[in-house]
Image (cartoon, helix red, strand yellow):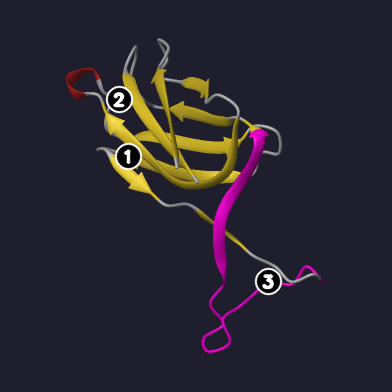
Amino acid sequence: MRRYKVSVTTDGSGNATAYSPRIAGEIHSIQYVKDGSNGYTNGVDFTITAEATGENIWTQVDVNASAVVYPRAATHSQAGAAALYAAGGTGVLARVGVASDRVKIALAQGGAAKVGIFHILVA
């Protein structure tokens, strides 16, 4: 497993966009670490996607504290139909895969000149 650490500093409007280095593999988890007194203002919004395709990895609004997510994507049959567990019709999920792509981290409402750290774990 590999860890990619991305520090993201907001501009004067509380917005930011930052990118991980190019990575390849399945995203195991993303950990947001609020940076103490200089951390984002409560209520920060995250939109984290794959740069090349725009595939959603993690979107959350009104985040107030450090958080860890294990993002998963819906899987499909060869015919494009959603893959479901037979018993309850619950969707089958799998890790989000990236190949020589960067993870794009876009923030809004983070407060002026605030800092957060994102750890991206890739298997």
Figure check: 61 above or below 5:
below
Instruction: Farthest residue to the left: give it.
Output: 37
Q: Alpha-carbon neighbours of circle 1 within 10 Å: few (<14), some, or many (≥20)?
A: some
Q: Earlier in the sequence, mark 3 or mark 1?
A: 1
Q: Amino acid at mark 2?
A: Tyr
Instruction: Determine contact: label 3, label 1, CB under 8 Å.
Output: no
Q: Which residue is mark 3?
A: 82
The image shows residue 117, relative to residue 94, as above or below, that is above
Residue drawn at 26 percent across, 23 percent down: 39
Q: Amino acid at mark 3?
A: Ala
Residue 35 within the segment the image draws in magenta: no
Q: Say few, some or many: other residues with alpha carbon within 10 Å of mark 2 (under 14 / 14 to 19 / 20 or more).
A: many
Residue at 57 percent across and 71 percent down: it is 92
- Label pair 2/1, CB-CB below 8 angstroms: yes
Q: Secondary structure at mark 1?
A: strand
Q: Give the residue pinned by disc 2.
A: 40
The image shows residue 94 at horizontal and vertical percentages of 56, 61
Q: Residue at the far front: name it.
A: 1
- Nearer to the camera, 108 or 105: 105
**First to last magenta residue range:** 79-100
Among the 4 quarters of the image, the one containing residue 111: top left
- In the rendered structure, find residue 28 and report the number of the disc placed on it: none
**Identity of the residue drawn at 53% across and 77% down:** 90
Cα separation between marks 2 and 1: 9 Å
Kindly report the distance in space between the C-alpha atoms of the residues bearing marks 3 and 1. 30 Å
When the figure is inspected, residue 96 is found, relative to residue 78, above or below; the finding is above
- The disc at residue 63 is 1
Task: Choose between 4 and 37: the one closer to the eye.
Answer: 4
Mark 2 or 3 closer to N-term? Answer: 2
Whether residue 53 sits left or right of residue 2 in the image: it is right
From the top left corner, tell me how far across and down residue 96 is, in percent.
Answer: 57, 50
Amino acid beneath label 1: Val
